[in-house]
Image: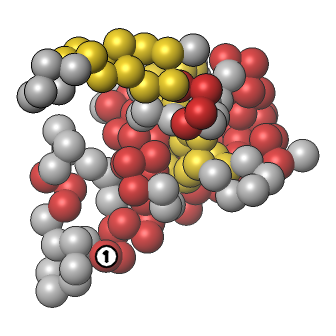
């Protein structure tokens, strides 16, 4: 599959073969599986969570706001997922790197606002390629991370 991307500075049509890029993206079915496993973990822990799954481009693919989950956590869950995908690492790790004096200090102000505490995790395939991410918010960050981890494990099994 080729896509025309426009013209170069030299007037040549720029085409890119998307098949040769071998870009993997999370499917809707996979995103829903991640979401369901995360919701099951939240129910097991008696938590009310907002759970977001984003695709390889950081775009929202699946979302659930459990009954009674905080309204203010909707945006946080989505931003956690986007942050994990944008940097291909857990949001808690981004947080460690963004402390005063650290190499990514103030990065949370980039990309329209990032979340740099636990609860966002990249979703990887068997070869370690990131093709999506999950973000969870609604309780203490340790519980957010437990629920996110349960969602990620759904893809690994």
User: Residue at (55%, 42%) from the top-left corner?
Assistant: 133
Which residue carries the number 1 mark? 97
- Residue density around tag 1, few if under 14, some if 14–19, many if 20 or more, within 10 Å: some
In the rendered image, the vertical position of residue 109 relative to residue 15, given as above or below: below
User: Residue at (73%, 48%) from the top-left corner?
Assistant: 125
Position of 58 compared to 115: left or right? right
Residue 50 visible at all? no
- Image quadrant where one finds the N terminus: top right
Farthest bottom residue? 101
Residue 116 visible at all? yes
- Return the residue nearer the eye: 120 or 14: 14
The tally of labels here is 1
- Return the residue nearer the eye: 3 or 64: 3
User: Residue at (39%, 40%) from the top-left corner?
Assistant: 82
Position of 84 compared to 94: left or right? right
User: Residue at (42%, 34%) from the top-left corner?
Assistant: 58
The x and y percentages for residue 102 are 22, 83
Res. 39 image quadrant = top right
Q: Secondary structure at mark 1?
A: helix
- Return the residue nearer the eye: 4 or 49: 4
The x and y percentages for residue 62 are 57, 20
Res. 117 image quadrant = bottom left
The x and y percentages for residue 28 are 67, 17
In the rendered image, the vertical position of residue 121 relative to residue 154, given as above or below: below
- Return the residue nearer the eye: 16 or 68: 16
In the rendered image, the vertical position of residue 128 relative to residue 62, given as above or below: below
The x and y percentages for residue 80 are 41, 45
């Amino acid at each position: 599959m080729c896509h025309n991307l426009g013209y170069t500075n030299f007037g040549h049509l720029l085409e890119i073969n998307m098949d040769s890029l071998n870009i993997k993206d999370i499917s809707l079915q996979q995103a829903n599986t991640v979401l369901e496993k995360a919701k099951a973990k939240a129910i097991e822990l008696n938590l009310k969570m907002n759970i977001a799954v984003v695709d390889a481009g950081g775009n929202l693919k699946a979302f659930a706001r459990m009954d009674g989950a905080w309204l203010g956590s909707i945006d946080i869950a989505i931003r956690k997922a986007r942050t994990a995908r944008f940097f291909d690492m857990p949001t808690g790790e981004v947080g460690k790197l963004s402390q005063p004096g650290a190499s990514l200090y103030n990065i949370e102000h980039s990309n329209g606002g990032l979340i740099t505490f636990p609860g966002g995790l990249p979703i990887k395939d068997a070869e370690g390629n990131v093709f999506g991410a999950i973000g969870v918010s609604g309780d203490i960050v340790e519980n957010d991370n437990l629920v996110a981890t349960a969602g990620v494990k759904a893809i690994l099994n």
